[in-house]
């Protein structure tokens, strides 16, 4: 499942990896991105939902930074410009409509610019059937939704994920950024990854880190 599919780079890759009996669900709310996404997914077995994700059905304003088509968000970060209203739906509803049935979700990729907690909490009864999650940790965008990166680790732990790793930290202009000790490569328990995040405080405004979480 690719939530925040942008123009489809990962969704297309996932469709090749799952094979003819697999299924990829892609979710993207932005009309401009959707025009590219539909073309890039042509001929693939991807079920596309042109919506944003939230805890409840409804509508919300979509905001965009001036020069980043991948940074559009339901949260109003300081430089965000309003882009119009978009439909919002829970992941539990989308999974049911996609016909996933009794299958497990092997991977949930979240790139939703701060709305990660809302997306995870919208899984409802599906939460225990998602094996792995990969998402961004970005204090600037998550602050707009009222929580810190450590809060996302706490939520994932409550959902039953017990192994975590931090991947591909980037800074200004997408350049690789080093992380201080006690950061290390490989899988960590909740306490260890929380200590690594504490070492980043105060969290640099331009730092983005990918977090992967899996069940034991």
Image (cartoon, helix red, strand yellow):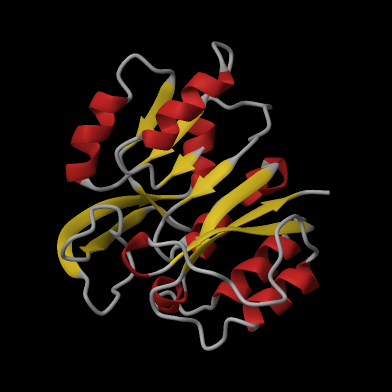
Q: Position of residue 170 (x, y in %)?
A: 45, 63
Q: Position of residue 65 (x, y in %)?
A: 21, 66
Residue situated furthest top in the rendering: 20
Residue situated furthest right in the rendering: 216
Left or right: where 137 falls relative to 105: left
Identify which residue, 150 or 91, lies in the foreground: 150
Above or below: residue 152 compared with residue 200: above
Identify which residue, 171 or 203, lies in the foreground: 171
Q: Residue at x 46, y 62 (%)?
A: 176
Above or below: residue 144 compared with residue 5: below
Residue situated furthest bottom in the rendering: 202
Q: Residue at x 68, y 75 (%)?
A: 196
Left or right: where 19 falls relative to 64: right
Quarter of the image where one finds residue 66: bottom left
Q: Position of residue 141 (x, y in %)?
A: 39, 71
Q: Residue at x 55, y 22 (%)?
A: 17
- Total labels: the figure holds 0
Q: Residue at x 35, y 52 (%)?
A: 88
Q: Specify whether residue 199 is in view.
A: yes
Above or below: residue 128 compared with residue 176: above
Q: Position of residue 70 (x, y in %)?
A: 30, 53
Left or right: where 95 falls relative to 47: right
Identify which residue, 66 or 84, lies in the foreground: 66
Q: Specify whether residue 98 is in view.
A: no
């Amino acid at each position: 499942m690719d939530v925040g599919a942008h123009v489809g780079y990962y969704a297309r890759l996932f469709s090749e990896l799952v094979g003819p009996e697999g299924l990829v669900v892609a979710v993207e709310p932005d009309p401009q991105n959707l025009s590219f996404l539909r073309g890039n997914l042509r001929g693939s077995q991807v079920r596309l939902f042109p919506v944003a994700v939230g805890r409840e059905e409804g509508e919300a304003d979509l905001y965009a930074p001036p020069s980043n088509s991948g940074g559009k968000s339901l949260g109003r970060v300081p430089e965000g410009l309003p882009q119009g209203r978009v439909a919002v739906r829970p992941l539990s509803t989308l999974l049911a409509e996609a016909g996933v049935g009794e299958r497990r979700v092997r991977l949930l990729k979240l790139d939703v610019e701060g709305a990660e907690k809302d997306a995870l909490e919208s899984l409802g009864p599906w939460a225990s059937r998602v094996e792995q999650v990969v998402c961004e940790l970005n204090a600037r965008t998550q602050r707009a939704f009222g929580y810190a990166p450590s809060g996302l680790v706490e939520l994932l732990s409550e959902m039953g994920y017990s192994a975590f790793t931090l991947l591909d930290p980037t800074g200004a202009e997408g350049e690789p950024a080093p992380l201080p000790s006690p950061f290390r490569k490989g899988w960590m328990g909740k306490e260890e990854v929380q200590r690594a995040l504490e070492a980043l405080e105060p969290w640099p405004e331009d730092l983005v880190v990918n977090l992967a979480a899996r069940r034991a």
